[in-house]
Amino acid sequence: MPTNYIKNLGQKNFDEICNKFQNVIMQNKPVWRGTVYIGEKPLYIECNVKWLAEKIPLYFVKAIENTKINGCKELYILNHGVHKFVPSPDCCTTDLAFVGSNIYKHPDIIIHNNCVFVRKNPVFYLSITEEYGTNFYHLGENHLLMRLLNYIFDDDSNIVLHGAAVGNEDYGVLITGLSGSGKSTLSAYCLANGMKFVGDDRIALHRENNTVFANPIYTTLSLNETIDGVKTTFSSRPNGCNKDVYVVDKSQISNHIPIKAIIEPIKSGKDKPIIERCNLSPILTRICMDYSYFSLLSRNTNPMNDYKKISNLLTGVESFNIELSTDINENAKAICNLISTKGVI
């Protein structure tokens, strides 16, 4: 597409869009308002979308209604869709709005799936439609709001990665791998074997006193089966998905696990699982490719910068492969044993 067809949305037009949001916010009383925590970072939310507001207290590890922390970031969620704020887009993609013969682009506006997301630090706006809510009636993996939370909090010191994380207060592991590699199931079976759960899809990581810590973004776990020993409540099955979304009991979730190792599953079909140390570089490369691709929704990516940022964050973390057996519970027990022995194999 020739770039001369793309018009930047000027500052005046951008301010007008933000003012429209503010006017709508002032005219409506939110269904839910309060502060949620993404890891250890507070986010004030006012939500006017009923189905979404009902899930906020369940889907965030810590949600305090009618409370606002001074100086924290703010997110306002409305149910007016795109057309209320951007002039009649005929077609939208993740970063371009097609309006008649004009194509608009702005670094602080994302238009996607008939939703519009606007950043004006420290304030963020999200407007969605009820049709969108019907099709994505959950807050689990790959939900648009969860991707945008990455956009709000992901910076040089806080990184949101695709992976599962489990462990105890002394030793945690990040389970990586492409979608469908079994991260959710493995983490659930580790939970059933006594480990604490951080997440099965998106994990917030930060470095503190030379240690990497993992924090949960939300409380959901996506599975196609129920597992004994895992305290969950069924939430929904999103349209087009082959997994159900469950809410994990907060007693089984840790808000602060030290990540001492990365484990990458390898399907092998052996009788018993085998865990071996491996080179971290190939794993980092795959993590960074996934991270850059996932981030295309919300920012321009630079794979070299992403690699440097993630490798610096994970300095000192051990790396292992696990050759998976046909017995999922035995695979989880092998990971739990690695955690219990603090990396001794």
Image (tube, rainbow, N blue to C red):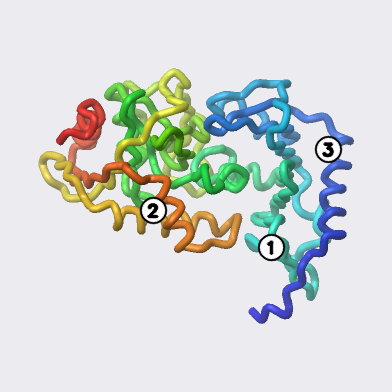
- Mark 1 or 2, which is nearer the eye? 2
Q: Is residue 127 left or right of residue 309?
A: right
In the rendered structure, find residue 25 and report the number of the disc placed on it.
3
* Residue at 26%, 45% in the rendered image: 319
Q: Is residue 167 left or right of residue 104?
A: left
The answer to whether residue 208 is seen in the rendering is: yes
Q: Are marks 1 and 2 in contact (CB under 8 Å)?
A: no
Q: From the image, tell me which residue sits under label 1.
A: 92
The kind of residue tagged 2 is: Ile
Which residue is drawn at the image coordinates 12% and 39% (left, top)? 272
Identify residue for label 2: 287
Single out the mark in the foreground, 1 or 3. Answer: 3
Distance from the alpha carbon under mark 2 to that under mark 3: 39 Å
Q: Mark 3 falls on what kind of element?
A: helix
Please indicate, yes or no, whether residue 325 appears anywhere in the rendered image.
no
Displayed quadrant of residue 182: top left
Mark 2 and 3 residues: CB-CB less than 8 Å, in contact?
A: no
- Provide residue 67's location: percent of width, then percent of height: 71, 22
CA neighbours of label 2 inside 10 A, class few (<14), some (14 to 19), many (20+) = many
Q: State the CA–CA distance, disc 1 to disc 2.
A: 29 Å
214 lies left or right of 277: right
Q: Is residue 100 above or below residue 270?
A: below
> Disc 1, disc 3: CB below 8 Å?
no
Question: SS for tag 2?
Answer: helix
The amino acid pointed to by label 1 is Cys
Count of all numbered marks drawn on residues in the image: 3
Estimate the x, y position of residue 191 in percent, counting from the top left.
Answer: 33, 27
In this view, the residue in front, 50 or 240, is: 50
